[in-house]
Image (cartoon, grey):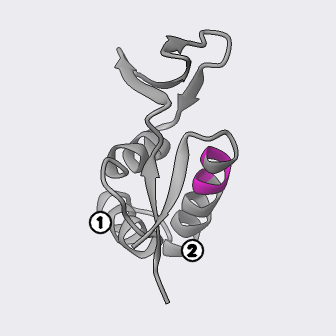
Amino acid sequence: MNDVKFQRSPDFIYRKIVDESILVPLHKDVADMDSIYTLNPVGAFIWEKLENPVGKAELHNALQNAYDAEPEILYADLVRFLEEMTAIGAIIEVEQ
């Protein structure tokens, strides 16, 4: 059975501006400024890890190493982030 991994969609631009991390969707190579998404620090951390395909377990381990929080809370945050970002097309699933 193949492990599902996640990766950033090329249809979104990520930028850090001062203390904010934002995602801007692209439509036909033009930024859609009406649909800007702001990421919290945990979301920005996960997004940065998604440069290459990565699975939930690896992401969860990275979160545990970076944040002093209960593993169950980090996992719930991770799953919610992946679901929300997949729903808007910012993250894609890849099988490897």
Task: Tell me if residue 19 comes above or below residue 60 in the rendering.
Answer: above
- Residue 47: image quadrant is top left
Q: Earlier in the sequence, mark 2 or mark 1?
A: 1
Please indicate whether residue 89 sits to the left or right of residue 87 in the image. Answer: left
Q: CA distance from mark 2 to mark 1?
A: 14 Å
Task: Tell me if residue 63 comes above or below residue 58 in the rendering.
Answer: above
Task: Tell me if residue 85 comes above or below residue 67 in the rendering.
Answer: above
Asked if the residue at tag 1 contacts the one at tag 2, i.e. Cβ–Cβ closer than 8 Å, the answer is no
> In this view of the protein, which residue sits in the foreground, 84 or 88?
88
Identified at 54% across, 60% down, the residue is: 78
> In this view of the protein, which residue sits in the foreground, 5 or 36?
5
> What percent of the width, then of the height, locates residue 93?
53, 59
Identified at 67% across, 39% down, the residue is: 88
Query: Looking at numbered disc 1 in the image, what kind of residue is underneath it?
Result: Asn
Q: Is 67 in the magenta?
A: no
Please indicate whether residue 47 sits to the left or right of residue 31 in the image. Answer: left
> What percent of the width, then of the height, locates residue 1?
50, 90
Label 1 element class: helix
Please indicate whether residue 10 sits to the left or right of residue 88 in the image. Answer: left
Query: Looking at numbered disc 2 in the image, what kind of residue is underneath it?
Result: Glu
- Residue 82: image quadrant is bottom right
Query: Residue furthest toward the front?
Result: 28
- Residue 68: image quadrant is bottom left
Which residues fall within the magenta stretch? 81-85
**Pointer 1 residue:** 65
**Pointer 2 residue:** 72
Label 2 element class: helix
